[in-house]
Image (cartoon, grey):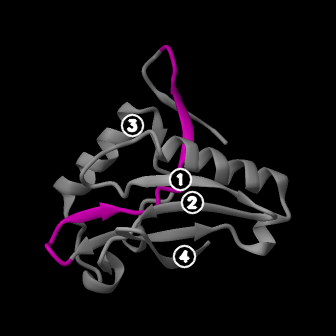
Amino acid sequence: MHYRLVEVPNRLVAIKVLTADASRSESRRQMFREEARLASSVSHAHIVQVYEFGRDNDLEFIVIEYVEGQPLSRIIRGRPLPPRQVALAVARSRRQGLLPRDLKPGNILLTTDGEVKVVDFGLEMGRETASGDSSVQG
């Protein structure tokens, strides 16, 4: 994935773009679109907001909230994640039927105000089984 910073009227946004190599695979394009659709259904203080997603010619994109900050991977260097804010974000996404597949310090930003924002879950659509266990479709 690549991110680009773009200024639109009254707001700064980031655009997540599917790479050219990944765009050659129909299954990767479908997974990217599904991730965008599912992520746009979640609203939480510790999850980056998805504003829009779509396709322009052969370019798949997701327009997301711009978060001024740094990835935790640059800040913590072997220290544990801030558990409460990350747990709240994961709990909200799980209640929406989303299972984080790629939750790691590089996908979590620490804002200049010290708040956590989960930027990329590498989402998969999940469903609960009769026993209450989660299964993953992908």
Tell us which disc is closer to us: 4 or 1: 1
Report if residue 102 lies within the magenta region. no
Question: Against 6, is 16 above or below?
Answer: above
Residue 28 quadrant: bottom right
Q: Secondary structure at mark 4?
A: strand
The image's mark for residue 3 is 4
First in sequence: mark 2 vs mark 4: 4
Report which residue position mark 1 lands on. 52
Q: Position of residue 119 (x, y in %)?
A: 41, 63
C-alpha separation, residue under disc 2 versus residue under disc 1: 6 Å
Between the residue at mark 2 and the residue at mark 3, the CA separation in whole angstroms equals 21 Å
State the extent of the magenta-drawn residues as a range.
112-130
Left or right: residue 132 versus residue 136 is: left
In this view, which residue lies farthest toward the left? 113
Q: Earlier in the sequence, mark 3 or mark 4?
A: 4
Q: Please, what secondary structure does the residue beneath circle 3 have? A: helix
Where is residue 136 drawn, in percent x and y? Answer: 58, 37
Where disc 1 sits, the SS reads strand
Give the foreground label among 2 and 1. Answer: 1
Query: Which quadrant holds residue 92?
Result: top left
For discs 3 and 1, the disc positioned in front in the rendered view: 1
- Which of 30/72 is in front? 30
Label number found at residue 94: 3
Camera-side mark, 2 or 3: 2
**Sequence-earlier tag: 2 or 3:** 2
Q: Residue 62: which disc?
A: 2
In this picture, is 113 found above or below 35? Answer: below
As shown in the figure, which amino acid type bears the numbered disc 1? Glu
The outermost residue toward the front is 9
